[in-house]
Amino acid sequence: MKIGILGAGSWGTTLAIILSPKSETVYLWSHSRASEISVQRENLRYLPGIKLPENIEVTGNLDDITELDLSFLFFVIPTQYLRSVVKNFHWHYKRPPIVVSAIKGIEEHTFKRPSEILCEYLPVEHPVVLGGPTIANEIVRGLPTAIVCASEDESSAYAVQQLLNSHHLRAYRHTDVVGVELASALKNIIAIAAGIVQGLSLGANALGALLTRGLTEIRRFGVAHGARAETFSGLAGMGDLLTTAISSFSRNRYVGVEIGRGKKLSEILSNMVMVAEGVWTTRSVLSMANKLGITMPITREVYAILFEDKSPATAIETLMARELKFED
């Protein structure tokens, strides 16, 4: 069995490492750092200190991936760059691999989910999408983790579930692709808000309330787009939200913490190595929520802080002064 992985960030590299014992060869594509990773046998930028197994081949040439007889093909590219990569992907497979999206975001302007972008360019009807609390630095060190594999084609979801499952990674199946993808993307908005709360030292009560009401917003938005409400109580919803909101490895939480401490968004992003998907997801989601009349007060205030220079303290005051209502 051979596996292809497009994207050599922390998550893509982690997937390559944990899948290497189950594959003859894992081919890892990097847009700009293939030579460095291949020579060093280590992803110094994202996973320093973790050596790549010998059966991982690193390449910077997309054609090296398209001309192989692959069983599985993973896309692990930030959402805003996915289209530019996949539209140049030349599909030469005689026996199509199972396509997997391990991406958590929403494309700006089009509001496309990653699986929808893949289906636009590839002859794939039902890709598998991954969700759940998957901090790469913990998984690559063998710490216990649970993940969810969602697809409308249950046989594909089952194949990916079998592939990923191990003694330290427990995989579950799901059929609600829309719910898993939206939960995975929108939780980053609330994680930024959670970071702001922690950066301002507002306490555990505030954080608990924020996460609870944030999950309500995510579920409300997802159901309006055809997702199932119960999906947001599972690994892709509550599980991923809690983890991203409290983990020191969370890039979206980091953005929020730094904002809470007084830094400007442009300064924070210019000093980051990784991509904080939640920043751009906030803009896309609020625009869509406004069009559809979906109430998302936390998302609105996160947007105001990120893009309208509203102070976090004023945003908190706005949320606390909202009209009283029943809890939904």
Image (spheres, helix red, strand yellow):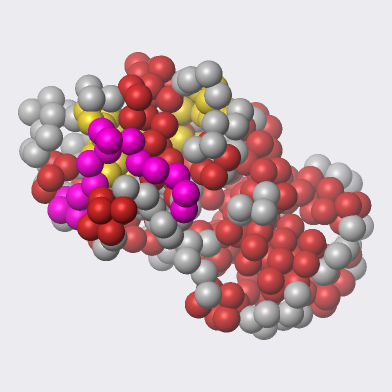
Query: Which residue corresponds to the image point at 38% horizontal and 22% vertical from the top-left?
Result: 163
Query: Which residue corresponds to the image point at 61% horizontal and 28% vertical from the top-left?
Result: 144
Span highlighted in magenta in the image: 48-62
In the displayed structure, 86 sits above or below 192; it is above
Residue 96 seen in render: yes
Image quarter where the C terminus lies is top right
Residue 56 is a magenta residue:
yes
Nearer-the-camera pick, 98 or 140: 140
In the displayed structure, 66 sits above or below 306; it is above
Residue 94 is a magenta residue:
no
Quadrant of residue 124 in the image? top left
In the displayed structure, 19 sits above or below 324; it is above
Q: Is residue 204 left or right of residue 73?
A: right
Query: Which residue corresponds to the image point at 47% horizontal and 66% vertical from the top-left?
Result: 273
Residue 116 seen in render: no
Tell me the chief SS of the magenta region. loop
Nearer-the-camera pick, 180 or 66: 66
